[in-house]
Image (tube, grey):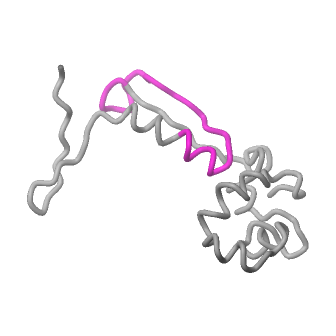
Amino acid sequence: MPCASLDDLDLDLFRTAYLPSMVAPEVIEENGRPVRQQLSSLHLTTPDGRPTTLGTLIVGLDPSSHIPGAYVQFVRYQGGDLDAPVADDQELRQNIVGVASRLEPLLRSNIRTRLVEEGSRETPQRPARS
């Protein structure tokens, strides 16, 4: 069940991060819509102001308390098999905007193989050890 009210949404995050990434600045300035109408037009709330599941996931203050399973679990194993010991295990329980900002550096610090273009193919390559 999505959030119950606008109080369950991070409206500052909506205004500063989400809205500018979805709507051109000149459009925001030109139309002068109140936040409630902006949220509704982007389907983050219903027309009567109740947060939708999308709104809860994108800018909810605590999505996993309203939507079971609304989190990302990051697991890195010490080996190549799922039977290998776990090297790192984290549950990221935030809205999608927050998870994305935490997940990017987490992935960058744990990627051990990169794809290298070889003609029309991509080949996995491990970085040289120093």
Residue at x-position 59% and y-position 44%: 99
Q: Give the tally of numbered discs.
A: 0
Whole-percent x, y for residue 122 in the image: 18, 54
In the displayed structure, does residue 92 sit left or right of residue 46? left
Above or below, 65 against 84 in this view is below
130 and 54: which one is in front? 130
Residue 128 percent coordinates (x, y): 16, 28
Report the residue that reaches farthest toward the left.
119
Magenta stretch contains residue 95: yes
Left or right: residue 102 versus residue 15 is left
Residue furthest to the bottom = 31
Q: Residue at x 43, y 22 (%)?
A: 87
Please report the residue visible at 79 percent of the width from the left and 50 percent of the height from the top: 66
In the rendered structure, the answer to whether residue 129 lies left or right of residue 58 reads: left
- Residue 58 vs 87, above or below: the answer is below
Q: For the N terminus, which image quadrant?
A: bottom right
58 magenta-colored: no
Q: Residue at x 91, y 73 (%)?
A: 48
Question: Image height check: is 84 above or below 74?
Answer: above
Q: Quadrant of the C terminus?
A: top left
Q: Position of residue 124 (x, y in %)?
A: 19, 44
Residue 70 in the image: state x and y as whole percent: 67, 48
Q: Nearer the viewer, residue 24 or 121?
A: 24
Image side of residue 66 versus residue 120, left or right: right
Report the front residue among 71 and 32. 32
Res 53 → quadrant: bottom right
User: Magenta stretch?
Assistant: 78-102
